[in-house]
Amino acid sequence: MKGMLQVYSGDGKGKTTAAFGLALRMIGNGKKVFIAQFAKRTESGELNAIKKFKDQITIKQYGGKNFIKEKPSVEDIETAKKGINEIKAILKFGEYDLVILDEANIAVYYNLFSIDELLGVIDNREKHVEVIVTGRKADKKLVEKADLVTEMKEIKHYYSKGIQARKGIEF
């Protein structure tokens, strides 16, 4: 089976959730999954759940400080560069059937690595490896290259009423 490139982007909620749902579908079919989280270095419910599937799902975080409201630091850039270099080897080797690059769109947007670096890594993967790239602000080059693009569009969100992120729902 040929691996496709999927992109989940947009300003709505659910990009990471959709990608993790596909990870569960893959392991339910005896496949192996690698998840790289860029711009994240936090504990969450999904990380705790994934630990129960450590033989089938590997997850690594390549995030530094929470820079979304600030400029990325040198550490943020170095951590992301290390991550994209590790992903290059993982995709080329082909051990995993699905590789999720969670928040890689944001990493590109904030210049942690370039869109050309990201596309080069994806282009040099083993043919069977499915890749999902998540995050707001997907670069148009990635969108053009993708086999499937889903835009999560916010219609209504309870954040606008002052309701903060809830354990088990948002993290």
Image (cartoon, rainbow, N blue to C red):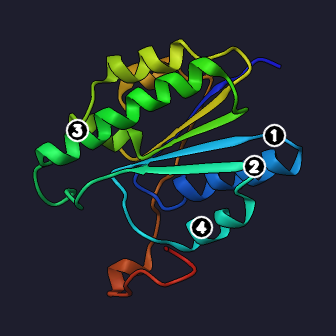
Mark 1 Cα-neighbour bin, 10 Å: few <14, some 14–19, many ≥20: some
Identify the mark nearer the N-term, 1 or 4: 1
* Image quadrant in which you'd find residue 94: top right
Which residue is disc 4 drawn over?
Answer: 46
In terms of sequence position, does the residue under pointer 2 or pointer 3 come before the other? 2
Secondary structure category for the residue under label 4: helix
Could you tell me the amino acid type at mark 1?
Answer: Lys
Instruction: Say if 45 sits above or below 115 in the image.
Output: below
> In 3D space, how far apart are the residues under numbered discs 4 and 2 (Cα atoms)?
15 Å
What's the distance in space between the residues labelled 4 and 3, CA to CA?
25 Å
Question: Do the residues bearing badges 2 and 1 touch, measured as CB atoms within 8 Å?
Answer: yes
Q: Residues within 10 Å of mark 3 (few under 14, many from 20)?
A: some
Q: Which residue is mark 1?
A: 31
Judging by the rendered image, the residue that carries numbered circle 2 is 56
| Residue 123: x %, y % from top left | 52, 13
Residue 114 position (above or below residue 67): above
In the image, what residue type sits under mark 3?
Glu
